Amino acid sequence: MASKIEKNYLAAKEMYASIGVDTDKALDLLSKIPISLHCWQGDDVNGFETNAGGTSGGILATGNYPGCARNPEELRADLDKAFSLIPGAKRLNLHAIYLDAPKAVERNKIAPEHFESWIQWAEEKGAGLDFNPTFFGHPKAASNLTLSSPDAGIRKYWIEHAKACRKIAAAMGKRLKNPCIMNTWVQDGFKDVTIDRIQARKRLMASLDEIYSEKISPKYMKDAVESKLFGIGVESCTVGSSEFYMGYAVKNNLLLCLDAGHFHPTEVISDKISSALLYLDEILLHVSRPVRWDSDHVVTFDDELQAIAREIITCGANRVHIGLDYFDVTINRIAAWCIGTRNMQKALLKALLEPAAELKKMEKNFEGTGKLALLEELKAYPFGAVYDYFCEKQGVPSGMKWLDDVNKYEKEVLFKR
């Protein structure tokens, strides 16, 4: 006997079929689009270095919700819970400070062996891994200048760190038979009036050239670079600006990372995706929700998220790597993962359930009235019933049922830490 969720789905399926949309096909496509969960939501961007330096470089996680993961084992347990409540394909995005080592390791000396437990965990989960060098929260980053520092010794240290991270990313991709996306972001910048921006950018370019001088097969890892508008303590000049990294990525055929919170409040990354893909084979997205500036709030089902998803589907999901990036310490961290990831999936599903061919035809023929009418009508279509069915097929709770599991885990595990 069909469940209530299945009955609702069959009714929705018939409704979408009337406008030429195959819901079964949409769900099949959705199941194959991986979303990379960011490990740093689980521990407030602290990391697990035995000589941890905390956050810096314009990064600030606010709040004091109990239950923060204190070591790799606790973080993996929390991720296990989150993964069990999220349908579809998933990846994990790690920062270099999340190494699993019994004693302190300098960042320019880290190696694949320090992430062996994470690789084993990903193998067990059937999930891919992504990776990031960590250029903040360290004595050698105290000036907020790393790869662009005028101090050759500082630059050398961070170049060595990035090279070590590329080898780690390649090892992850090779073991998992799934390319690891390694994203390079540095907080480098100046707090006040900046005179010689071009020399700082020349130093950053030279450092990056050295880092990427070793060619690594894209079968194992792919390099991405990420810009930022500004950060706390680097308000006047960010060396790695949008224009800098757009040019560098195109020139060197790297992935360009577009972070939803790294632009002016009047800019949106949904409008940048198609332009970037005209010049680059693939791009990386860090999906977050900025409130005024780069505040990295949990992703909600807002207009911009839906616009991002539509661009991903229109431009080709196989060319866009989706990662989440926020760190909210005012709510349960596992719930933050679930809310954000499920919203990203809902936005992708809503885009997949649009009669794209018909809408494109209307646009090409200047049928603005019909296009707007259809888009508005679609807002009332029951895509939620289709998502609930997706959850049921994937063996995870639908609706608000997942929150019951989170609350139970919170009482039994998180509040006892």
Image: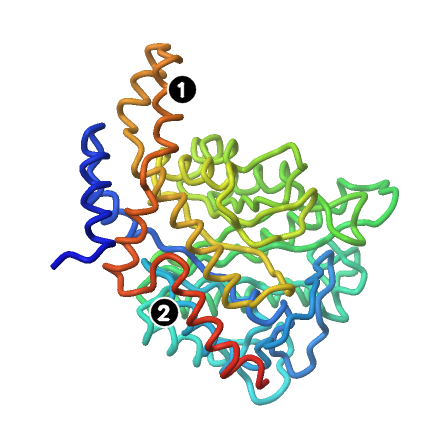
Colour basis: rainbow
Residue 329 appears left or right of 397: right
Q: Residue at x 67, y 42 (%)?
A: 241
Asked which secondary structure carries label 2, the reply is helix
Residue receiving disc 2: 84
Task: Tell me the quarter of the image containing the C terminus.
Answer: bottom right
Q: Residue at x 57, y 77 (%)?
A: 69
Tag 2: residue type? Ser
Q: Residue at x 63, y 39 (%)?
A: 242
Q: Position of residue 277 (x, y in %)?
A: 43, 35
Give neighbour class at mark 2: few <14, some 14-19, many 20+ (Cα, 10 Å).
some
Task: Tell me the quarter of the image containing the N terminus.
Answer: bottom left
Residue 8 appears left or right of 170: left
The answer to which of 211 and 143 lies nearer the viewer is 143
Task: Identify whether 22 is placed above or below 322.
Answer: above
Please give the label number shown on residue 372: 1
